[in-house]
């Protein structure tokens, strides 16, 4: 594997994630929620993912809220059109 370290998200990536309906619902995001407010409630990393076997190559995001509830973190990747989807 070439690279396995996590990367920070760009402001554009944060905004993309904030626009996903399931994320909005899970974190209570409304139209007045700022990027800084959302960032203060979630841990997020991006990996430049390369599958160990034929499969996905691209962005892989992991989001975890600031409360450990026992629920799994959100995992997102890009579909063939470049849109973020849940894994």
Image (cartoon, rainbow, N blue to C red):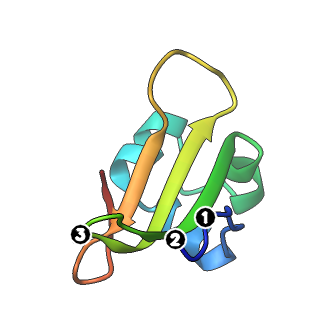
Task: Characterize the local packing of mark 2: few (<14), some (14-19) or many (20 or more) Cα atoms within 10 angstroms.
Answer: few
- Tell me residue 32's x, y (percent): 62, 55
The reply to whether discs 2 and 3 touch (Cβ–Cβ < 8 Å) is no
Residue visible at 52% across and 71% down in the picture: 1
Residue visible at 68% across and 63% down in the picture: 5
- Tell me residue 69's x, y (percent): 55, 16
Q: How far apart, in angstroms, are the residues tagged by discs 1 and 2?
A: 7 Å
Q: Secondary structure at mark 1?
A: loop
Residue indicated by mark 3: 55
Name which of mark 3 and mark 1 comes first in the sequence.
1
Residue indicated by mark 1: 4
On the question of residue 4 being in view, the answer is: yes
On the question of residue 30 being in view, the answer is: no
Residue visible at 59% across and 38% down in the picture: 64
Question: Could you tell whether 70 is left or right of 10 in the image?
Answer: left
The reply to whether discs 1 and 2 touch (Cβ–Cβ < 8 Å) is yes
Task: Characterize the local packing of mark 3: few (<14), some (14-19) or many (20 or more) Cα atoms within 10 angstroms.
Answer: few
Q: How far apart, in angstroms, are the residues tagged by discs 2 and 3?
A: 14 Å
12 shown above or below 29? below
Total numbered labels: 3
- Tell me residue 62's x, y (percent): 53, 50
Residue visible at 45% across and 22% down in the picture: 71
Residue indicated by mark 2: 1
The reply to whether discs 3 and 1 touch (Cβ–Cβ < 8 Å) is no
61 shown above or below 26? below
Question: Could you tell whether 13 is left or right of 56 in the image?
Answer: right
């Amino acid at each position: 594997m070439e690279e396995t370290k996590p990367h920070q998200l760009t402001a554009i990536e944060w905004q993309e994630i904030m626009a996903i309906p399931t994320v909005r619902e899970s974190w209570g995001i409304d139209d007045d929620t700022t990027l800084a407010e959302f960032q203060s409630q979630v841990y997020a990393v991006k990996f430049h993912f390369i599958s160990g076997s034929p499969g996905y190559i691209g962005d892989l995001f992991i989001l975890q809220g600031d409360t450990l509830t026992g629920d799994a973190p959100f995992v997102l990747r890009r579909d063939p059109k470049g849109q973020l989807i849940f894994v």
